[in-house]
Image: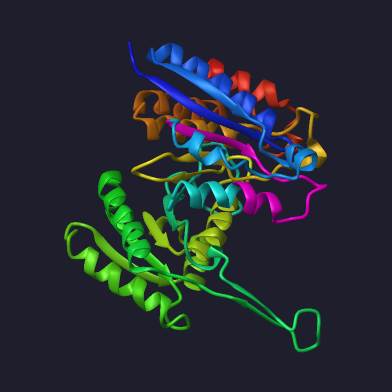
């Protein structure tokens, strides 16, 4: 018999519970096939709880989450809660509190999926973005001077520590080596403008890179990366970048791989507890309608399995997604597919062989 895992589930808001339901359906099937056991612990963190209690994340939550093997997240965002409260109070608090210092985003085009890029296919669109996840502009350092007046000043500081930059870059080199595809790592920055912060990134990239002579080192400014992701995505194998730029280019990556309906990501602490999620939002107008494509959520579950060391189980999920999309039965990854959320989940279940 295999291992026994403890998985925290935060279904969240809007369509989060619906897509999480399908991901958990796939987890059950894979667990039976691969003969491992798991226990899920469900948390109601999200907009409804906040409106009811005024609390986004209880004080005890982080300590409880430190005791699980992984966290699965559906979606966060409620129309009756001011933007930023849940994102900072739940998502960022978990990322920072559990030191999930790597944001891991595969950009992979599956066969049969439309991309807006002409003459590009799965062979050309297959790379990974590794984003620093706990520093930069997201640290929230700053404030206002003379707020509300015509002389108002808003300050938001970009914070980069040697430790934070180095551990992110080192993780990226190690992953590039492990991925063993093109063995090429691209540093994405804006050192020609952010001359202090990204000088640090460039120096650390060069120093750590000396330990990895077999890996090709590449560099591009973030604006160039955006252009080349559209024109020549095949040039990229692994990209490493700071928090803000990673946030932006991974959304571009989602579009070229077919849209938010297929994109998933992980918030990784290699030495601790990691969290996996579809990168789409909570889409409140579709709540309860059973029309959202759950493939991104299912892909996130595959990433969770990979992280737990259940490689065969993760491969089963990935191949089932590819097999289903290649069949042509899912014509559209949006709500216009004509398929129900649970119908797509059932298709993936039937494709797990």
Q: Residue furthest bottom?
A: 151
Q: Is residue 224 above or below residue 82?
A: below
User: Residue 335 lies in what quarter of the image?
Assistant: top right
Q: In the image, is 238 to the left or to the right of 50?
A: left
Question: Total of numbered circles in the picture?
Answer: 0
Q: Is residue 2 above or below residue 161?
A: above
User: Residue 23 lies in what quarter of the image?
Assistant: top right
The quarter in which the N terminus is drawn is: top left
Seen at 38% across and 15% down, the residue is 34
Where residue 183 appears, as percent x and y from the top left, is 27, 53
- In the image, 134 versus 235, the foreground residue is 134
- In the image, 222 versus 78, the foreground residue is 78
Residue 84 belongs to magenta span: yes
- In the image, 256 versus 245, the foreground residue is 245
The quarter in which the C terminus is drawn is: top left
Where residue 116 appears, as percent x and y from the top left, is 61, 53
Does the rendering let one see residue 117? no
Where residue 117 appears, as percent x and y from the top left, is 57, 55
Does the rendering let one see residue 225? yes
Q: Which residues are magenta?
A: 69-90
Seen at 45% across and 40% down, the residue is 274
Seen at 76% across and 27% down, the residue is 290
Q: In the image, is 201 to the left or to the right of 289?
A: left
- In the image, 212 versus 346, the foreground residue is 212
Q: In the image, is 53 to the left or to the right of 106?
A: right
Seen at 51% across and 39% down, the residue is 276
Where residue 14 appears, as percent x and y from the top left, is 75, 37
Q: How is the image coloured?
A: rainbow
């Amino acid at each position: 018999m295999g291992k026994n895992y403890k998985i925290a589930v935060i279904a969240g808001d809007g369509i989060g519970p619906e897509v999480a339901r399908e991901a958990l359906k796939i987890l059950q099937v894979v667990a039976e096939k691969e003969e491992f056991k798991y226990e899920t612990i469900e948390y109601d963190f999200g907009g409804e709880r906040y409106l009811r209690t005024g609390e986004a994340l209880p004080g005890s939550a982080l300590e409880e989450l430190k005791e699980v093997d992984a966290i699965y997240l559906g979606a966060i965002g409620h129309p009756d809660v001011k933007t930023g409260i849940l994102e900072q109070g739940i998502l960022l608090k978990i990322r920072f509190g559990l030191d999930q210092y790597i944001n891991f985003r595969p950009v992979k085009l599956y066969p049969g999926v439309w991309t807006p890029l002409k003459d590009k296919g799965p062979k050309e669109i297959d790379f990974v973005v590794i984003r620093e996840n706990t520093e930069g502009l997201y640290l929230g350092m700053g404030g206002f001077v003379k707020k509300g007046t015509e002389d108002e000043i808003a300050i938001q500081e970009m914070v980069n520590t040697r430790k934070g930059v180095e551990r992110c870059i080192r993780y990226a080199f190690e992953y590039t080596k492990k991925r063993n595809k093109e063995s090429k790592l691209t540093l994405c920055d804006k050192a020609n403008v952010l001359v202090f912060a990204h000088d640090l990134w460039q120096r650390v990239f060069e120093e750590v890179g000396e330990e990895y002579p077999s890996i090709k080192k590449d560099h591009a400014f973030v604006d160039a990366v955006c252009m080349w992701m559209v024109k020549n995505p095949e040039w990229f194998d692994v990209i490493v970048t700071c928090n803000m730029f990673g946030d932006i280019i991974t959304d571009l990556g989602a579009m070229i791989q077919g849209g938010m309906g297929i994109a998933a990501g992980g918030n990784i602490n290699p030495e601790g507890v990691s969290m996996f999620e579809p990168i789409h939002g909570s889409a409140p107008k579709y709540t309860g309608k059973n029309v959202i494509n759950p493939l991104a959520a299912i892909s996130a579950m595959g990433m969770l399995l990979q992280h737990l060391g259940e490689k065969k189980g993760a491969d089963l999920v990935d191949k089932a997604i590819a097999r289903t999309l290649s069949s042509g039965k899912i014509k559209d990854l949006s709500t216009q597919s004509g398929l129900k959320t649970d119908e797509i989940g059932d298709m993936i279940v039937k494709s797990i062989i």
